[in-house]
Image: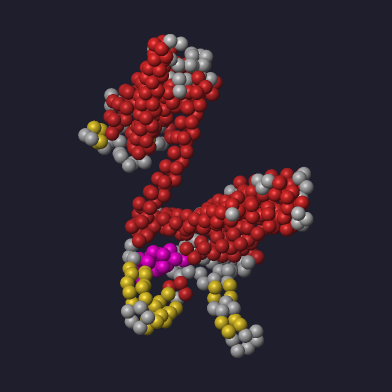
Amino acid sequence: MSTDTRALVATESSTLELAGGGLVALSLLLVVGGLVGLFGVVPVGATVAGVPFATLLGAGLLVLGAGVLGIGAASRTGLVATDPSRSAGLLAGGVFALFGLVVGGLVGAFALGLATAWPVTALLVGVGAGAATVLPREDLGSTLVPGSVAVVSGLTMLSGLVGPGWSWPIGDLSATLYAEVAIPLLAAVAGLLAAWTAAKAYGGFGSRGRQLGAYLLIGANAAWMAALLVGLVAFVLMKGFAPMTRGIRYGLFVQPWTWFYFPPIEEYVVISGPVIWFYWPFVMEGVALTNDINGVLPAIVGTFWLVLGAVTFAVPLGVGAAVFLTEYAEQGRFTGLVEVSTNGLWSTPSIVYGLFGLAFLVPRLGNTTSILAGQLVLGFMLLPLVVITSREALKSVPDAYRDASAALGVSKWETIKSVVLPAALPGVITGIILGVGRIAGETAPILLVMVSDPFPSAAARVVQGSFHFTGSFPFVAAPTIDLVQSSSALPYQLYAVISAGLDQNMAFAWGTALVLLLVVLSFYAVGIASRVYFRRKLNQ
């Protein structure tokens, strides 16, 4: 190849990469803008730098669509050097056909008013989009549909056909689609389709282009999941922080002797010397007419006992069952049946567990709702996941560990206890973390088997009495544990507040939601710290 030809190819490649990279950046910017508008961070009717937000989205879509169509045409006419395949492929054709099917059906049913003929328009648009993707060469097939969608969407917004204040009554569904949803959603979807196409163009189409397009979609999916998690936590924090922290007080007692009232045990404690005191009513009080600020202490205590009892019940049984099934039982029909059963139990709706607890456990545990019944029901829910994840963790331990231990003359049980279980412990802890995250937020089971008063004024006193020495045999008195009593829990209290339907209760609901989120995250933090600790121990 001559020097001039190499310089020409390098220039064409640089131009293609520059254009493709710019279109990818613009596409992702429009996706972010659509999500920002969809979640109401920037309303559709707002102005950004003196320009209406909807106009900015429309102009961006128009430029993006023109760029995508232009880069496809430039590749097809040979203005830029690419390596397209003969077709964009059946997968891309199927995706665009499905997209066209939905768009064609919506337009036919609601925009054109074709109450009975909308399937025809849906089929025509879907088949047309699929054919326009599969039949031409890849550079045209990959760009025609996304570019056209972006151009049409941009023109629709810029012309005011769909703008702030626009609404669309959806036929007989008694629902209306508003611009606050339609415009950001259209920008996000069109931007994502164009981003995939622009990434393929950046790679020059062909195998490299498809690989870059797949990377972008996977990365966008991961970013979306992370953004959703951060957005959810941030939204709850924004709504619940003020009501949760209202009334916090703290100070310093300087008296040599201080009587301090401790709400959880409803007793006064004598403290000697200066003491820093802290009062947080939302997490240290219950619900009572005499309270200036109502709190969720009884629900926090109930949630703690629920999770503690469920973990204590399910983890030993689940790990023991996993050890037996993996290390001792022969792999056959029995283990296959157990695997199918555990998967089915994990998929069983929580309300079914609650109904079982109401019909079977409650009559046998004092014939009343109780913490113990809630612990057992949530333990039954947690048990399948512990078995499944523990088995997978045990299977992931290399057989070389077992063989090396056996070669040293160590018994099978000692090998399991000293080698296999420690190596599998991080995976086991991960399963427990996932299970605790589920059961800590369950409402239906505890509603049926545990709760009587949704807004108690005091926490359930599970531990009654104290450990102290006595003058008679056996000379030691231990506290009594009373689990056969009702208690509230954070998920149910949140449900009860919301179902009351009073607007003034929403601040209390958001505060409760934030406390529940913090409790669940604290369980996660403990589990993650334990997993990191055992991993470090294994690597020593």
Closer to us: 38 or 33 = 33
Give the colour scheme of this rendering. Answer: secondary structure
> For the stretch drawn in magenta, what is the main secondary structure?
loop
Q: Can residue 108 be seen from the camera position used here?
A: no
Q: Quadrant for residue 104, please give it.
A: top left
Region of the chain picked out in magenta, as a range: 280-299
**Quarter of the image containing the C terminus?**
bottom right
- Residue 383 x/y as whole percent: 63, 54
For the image shown, how many numbered marks are present on the structure? 0
Q: Residue furthest front?
A: 3
Residue 290 in the magenta stretch? The answer is yes
- Residue 38 x/y as whole percent: 36, 38
- Residue 189 x/y as whole percent: 41, 30
Q: Quadrant for residue 192, please give it.
A: top left
Q: Is residue 498 left or right of residue 156?
A: right
Q: Is residue 247 left or right of residue 173?
A: left
Q: Residue at x 65, y 65 (%)?
A: 364
Q: Residue at x 54, y 66 (%)?
A: 486
Q: Is residue 359 left or right of residue 130?
A: right
